[in-house]
Amino acid sequence: MTVDAPDVRRADHRPLVDIISGSFGAGHDAAAREIAVRFERRGYATRTWDVVDLMPRRIGRGLRATYLRQIQSAPSTWRWLLRSLERSESGVRLVERAMHSAAGALLQVAAARPAAIVSTHPFASQALGELRAQGRLDVPVATYLTDMSVHRLWVHPGVDLHLALHAVPAEQAVRRGAARVRVIRPAVPLAFAQARHGRPPRAARRDLGLPASGRLVLVTGGSCGIGDLRRSAADIAATGVAQPVVLCGRNDRLRRQVLRAGAGHALGWVDDMPGALAAVDGVVQNAGGFTSLEALAAGAPVLTYRTIPGHGETNADALERSGLVPWARERDLLRPALERLLAGRHRDPMAALRRRPDIVDAVAPARLPSSA
């Protein structure tokens, strides 16, 4: 595969950082976008790539289609697959062989001589780590761990630096063989922190067509509306503690189901997520992904409920152990968990995380220019 990889430094004399994401859900791309913003604020040029596009079409797009179909239609098999890969060397080798298909394109990307390459997806990290281990890639590589739990596919000993959001995933990365790990500030856009002091909730609710009064809880399963969100909404409504607002994302079928069942308010794709978070009193989520960090940054307390199998369960456990997000494991525990959540909505669990080093300083502290 041939990629268009011009040398950005020759055009404007700024050092270059390449960021490799993966379009297997919106969280990896959202982190990549924010990482690019942070590097560019500090005087770097950046390019962002999708590992799906760097693999041959039949492999990259086939893997993405299979993942999305599996997580939506047969989520329990995703738990089985992740656990199998944790135990099976042959399974990991199979993944590595599939990722090797991106090697040529990644080397073309590196031909522009970037100062560093940052990965926000485990597939890209496996391919880049193997190239580093083989001595074929002489550009430093960092992996930004987007999840609070670390599957073994996230870690490759050839990667120079693994960046974690908390001590909990940092320890997991070390146990899985990461050569060097640093805990850094989460790469969440500043707009979410500003939402804490932005538009009044009443105005934000009006923009979304939501009730002006009463307590509202946003129910989310990521950009694809994955998981049994309709049942989650019904359970929340039955507690009488708050009205559910289901964030359906691109899942039009889920939106129709929620509206038909009268299980709560239903929102489709929302471009202004900081505004949506300003409109609600809390968030109930099931995957522990990027939306959880966005909500916490916006000052919205978060609760885990009806987790999706696989990484949803491991993320929920890690978020609870970190003290960031409690987990209501059973329906009977939902009401008291919601009451505690909304009673403590002015707490700021992200305060300590914001004092961590920024990703720019962690990746190349000695070489970074400052545009300030």
Image (cartoon, helix red, strand yellow):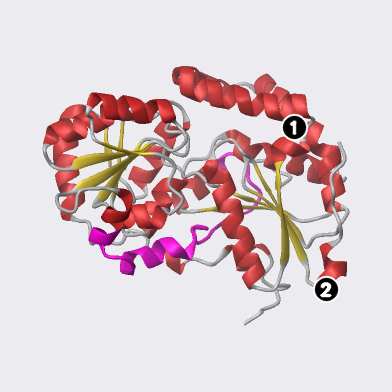
Magenta region: 174-203
Q: What residue type is labelled 1?
A: Met
Vertical placement of residue 124 versus 37, above or below? above
Q: Quadrant of the C terminus?
A: bottom right
What is the three-letter code of the residue carrying label 2? His
Q: Which residue is at the front of the view, 36 or 270?
A: 270
Question: Can the viewer see residue 323?
Answer: no
Relative placement, left or right, of 300 versus 171 is left
> How many residues crowd around disc 1 within 10 Å: few (fewer than 14), some, or many (20 or more)?
many
Q: Earlier in the sequence, mark 1 or mark 2?
A: 2
Q: Percent from the top left, x then y, of residue 311?
A: 47, 33
Question: Could you tell whether 152 is left or right of 61 in the image?
Answer: left
Q: Is mark 1 on a helix, strand or loop?
A: helix
Q: Which mark is residue 99?
A: 1
Across and down, in percent, residue 114 comes to 80, 60
Quick check: 368 above or below 237?
A: below
Question: How far is the residue under mark 1 from the one under mark 2?
Answer: 32 Å
Which residue is identified by label 2? 13
Query: Is residue 178 depicted above or below 239 in this figure?
Result: below
